[in-house]
Amino acid sequence: MIRQIKYFQSVVRNNSFSEAAEECHISQSAISQQIQALERELGFLLLERKKRKFSLTKAGEYFYKRSLVLVADYEQLCRESAQMASDENAALRIGYLRSYNGSGFYQALEEFAQKYPDVSVQIEHGNHEELYQLLISGRIDMAFNDQRRKFFDTYVNLILETTHSSIEISSRSPYAKFTEITTQELKNIPCILVTSKAQQETEREYYHDVVGFEGEFLYAENLEAARLLVIGGKGFMPVEGSGQMMNFGTSITRIPLLRDGVQITRNYCVFWKKDNSGYYIEEFADILKSKFA
């Protein structure tokens, strides 16, 4: 019946049996017979025929409009099912923000792995710019990243959460007594950034020029190494995300970070190319949304 519906749509779209037959690569008599067979199957007329002209019946007009959605959904279902059936080594390549501190992403990974155990999930860690380059070059399918650029129309830009920024500092520091702290008050304390060696200068420019940290910068490869520097009194670390601190007892104090009297906020999003939308990408995005909601 789907093929017959497509023939019917072609006739209506072209307003001609002969042009529809040419478009569908069958004879004019054959396409006419197929539409008549569709009408018999449905039990009502779709077209009113008058000599060599025709017009849609009221039911036919309604059926035509609704059938456009039906066929589009059917074709998408076929594409996604075929991809799942043919892709024996299905994989989902995700970029993850190296410095993010929350737990929602890992909860989503766990649920996705339980639901789709045959799908290989490949994680690429990186800073904002590294993940951006991986995404636009097609080396990852989607990126969990902070927002530093305006949104692009060619991508799905899904905001998962807006967080309030803080810093972590050694509890032995006199600044640990502050109930809130500003970027200006931190100008004489080194800022510890979680970044790869290749991205140190890019991250320094962002935190200096955009966030407003004016002092020295130190670098760590991961969150654990950065927190060890914090415990050792080497500086403070800006906290990415809304997750809890690791179990360092009373060694670290977290303080809200303000600029111009307002606590700094940041959006965390998941991005993927619209023309690369597929079942597993959208499914993982839906699971992510549920964890951050």
Image (cartoon, rainbow, N blue to C red):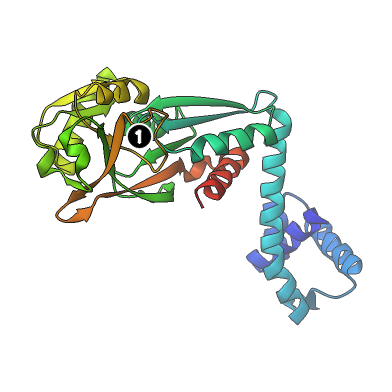
The residue nearer to you, when weighing 10 against 106, is: 106
Q: Is residue 124 above or below residue 186?
A: above
Name which residue lies at 42% across and 40% down.
243
Name which residue lies at 69% across and 36% down.
115
Q: Is residue 274 visible?
A: yes
Q: Is residue 45 above or below residue 160?
A: below
Horizontal and vertical percent position of residue 223: 35, 26
Label 1 environment density (alpha carbons within 10 Å; few <14, some 14–19, many ≥20): some
Q: How many labels were placed on the picture?
A: 1
The residue nearer to you, when weighing 133 against 154, is: 133
Mark 1: secondary structure: helix
Q: Is residue 263 left or right of residue 21?
A: left
Horizontal and vertical percent position of residue 19: 67, 60
Type of the residue with mark 1 = Tyr
- Res 210 quadrant in image: top left
Q: Is residue 27 above or below residue 53?
A: above
Q: Is residue 68 left or right of residue 251?
A: right
Residue underneath mark 1: 132
- Res 188 quadrant in image: top left
Q: Quadrant of the N terminus?
A: bottom right
Name which residue lies at 50% across and 37% down.
105
- Res 253 quadrant in image: top left
Q: Is residue 10 visible?
A: no
Q: Is residue 269 above or below residue 44?
A: above
Q: Is residue 110 left or right of residue 270?
A: right
Horizontal and vertical percent position of residue 224: 36, 23
The residue nearer to you, when weighing 167 against 251, is: 251
Q: Is residue 164 left or right of residue 24?
A: left
Name which residue lies at 38% across and 45% down.
268
Horizontal and vertical percent position of residue 13: 64, 65
